[in-house]
Image (spheres, rainbow, N blue to C red):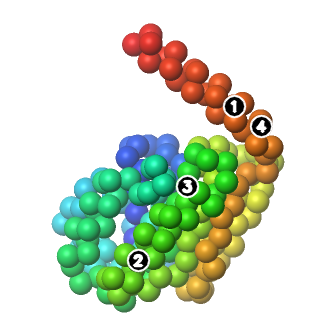
Amino acid sequence: MNRIVMLNGSPKKKGSASEQYLNMIYENLDNNYYIEEYDMNKLTNTIKKSILNADMLIIATPLYIDCLPSHVIKFLMELGDNDIAGKEVYFLVNCGFLEGVHTDVSVEILKNYCDYHHLIYKGSLGIGAGPIAYKKRIYNYFVKKELIIFSNYINYHKNYEDDYVRPLIPRFIYILFANINWFIQIKSFKKN
């Protein structure tokens, strides 16, 4: 049985977009995998042992200022000190920008990481509008469809050509709702 370790790079403990995307991938994977899930906040001996015994890694992380979050970089640097060569790696990066293509720099960083540590890079999916793209709405049809395709590539250990997707929602509506959300968050901070 193939062993997969799913790594969540979000600093949020629960309910992050990265967690939701990993759950969607998990739901679409075949039953012939032994799957373990961990967050990337700290590389513990338990996580390290699971990764070293895994055949494949699936890493989902948010985009922070065109890069990976600092704790994800630290986690990957510490992990790189071990013999991790030969493992297949798929990446999913989500961002708050509407267009998923904004994740392209972080995808390149992850490709270079794989190359340096002799990991088998299998492909990346960049998702725009991360905080809303996993919600059950009609405008997210293309995101969900691409996640199913991505999962099928994982099922068959196939190389996935890097792709970038976004919800089918007009830019001005997305910006309007994003601004309303920021305003609500600011008001809630002022009350505290």
What whole-number distance in Å separates the C-alpha atoms at marks 2 and 1?
35 Å
Q: Which residue has dot 4 on it? A: 172
**Label 1: element kind:** helix
Q: Nearer the viewer, mark 2 or mark 3?
A: 2
| First-in-chain label (2 vs 1) | 2
| First-in-chain label (2 vs 3) | 3
Residue 73, quarter of the rendered image: bottom left
Please tell me whether residue 153 is drawn above or below residue 135 in the rendered image. Answer: below
Residue type beneath disc 4? Phe
Residue type beneath disc 1? Phe
| First-in-chain label (1 vs 3) | 3
Q: Which residue has dot 3 on it? A: 94
Please tell me whether residue 27 is drawn above or below residue 16 in the rendered image. Answer: below
What whole-number distance in Å separates the C-alpha atoms at marks 1 and 3?
18 Å
**Label 4: element kind:** helix
| First-in-chain label (4 vs 1) | 4
Q: Which residue has dot 1 on it? A: 177
